[in-house]
Image: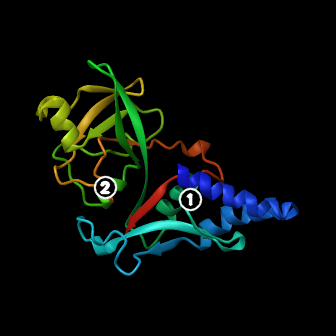
Amino acid sequence: MASFISQLKQVFRRLGRAPLFAIVILITVAIGVGANTVIFSVVEGVLLKPLPYKDADRLIGVWYTAPAINIPKINMAEYLYFIDREQSKTLEDIGVYDFLSFHITGGAQPEQVQGLQVTDGTLPILGVRPNIGRLFTQRDDSPNMPQTVILTYGFWQRHFGGDASVVGRPLKLDGAMHEIIGVLPANFEFMDRSDVDVVVPAQIDRSKTVLAGFRFNGLARL
């Protein structure tokens, strides 16, 4: 989120110097960038490749660039995610993700935990398989569907003692009940983050997407 805000401030500082062209430039960035200048980069084998994922050489980071206003890198917007997933002929699949925190209540003491928000294809793109239970489906990731959550192995051990019957139980995150549907393997690590406790589906409402909101990180498999 901090990255997006920083990018947005840069955009408005530059557009403020030429207000008469601001609307035209924003529309060009919103539409033209999505259509023509998506950047697929492995960065000399450094980005993603060293990570312990299946066929890591086929994994790529996805972002956009707005050269007209001198911004070399912009995160994924929700509407661009849908366009790329449905229309790309070079990608096996694309997913987006964001990090956030939750407050868990309902236990002896409230607790803040680290969360990961993903679209339904994100974990499969990395070749992740659950230790128990299942991963997210398109239904889980659809807006207005019952909320679900996947636990990381460490969180499962700390809070549930490794009890396999945890699948199907409720977990209250930020006051909302989520059904536990699975547990990730012990060696799971998302990018360079080893502190993730829970994973939730993004449930992006396509009908409410706008030509803005570049808050997600993107990844894909070729």
Q: Is 216 situated left or right of 162 in this image?
A: right
Q: Secondary structure at mark 1?
A: helix
The amino acid pointed to by label 1 is: Leu
The residue at 36%/55% (across/down) is: 122
Nearest to viewer (mark 2 / mark 1)? 2
- The residue furthest bottom is 44
The residue at 32%/37% (across/down) is: 149
State yes or no: discs 2 and 1 in contact (Cβ < 8 Å): no
Q: Which image quadrant: the C terminus?
A: bottom left
- The quarter holding residue 96 reads bottom left
**As displayed, is residue 142 above or below residue 42?**
above
Q: CA distance from mark 2 to mark 1?
A: 23 Å
The mark found on residue 190 in the picture is 2
**Front one among 89 and 7:** 7
**Front one among 111 and 132:** 111
Q: Position of residue 98 (x, y in %)?
A: 44, 50
Q: Position of residue 112 (x, y in %)?
A: 36, 32
**As displayed, is residue 155 above or below residue 165?**
below
User: Is residue 126 at least partly visible in the picture?
Assistant: yes
The amino acid pointed to by label 2 is: Phe
- The quarter holding residue 75 reads bottom right
Check disc 1 and report the residue beneath it.
80
The residue at 50%/44% (across/down) is: 204
- The residue furthest right is 20
Q: Is 180 situated left or right of 203 in this image?
A: left
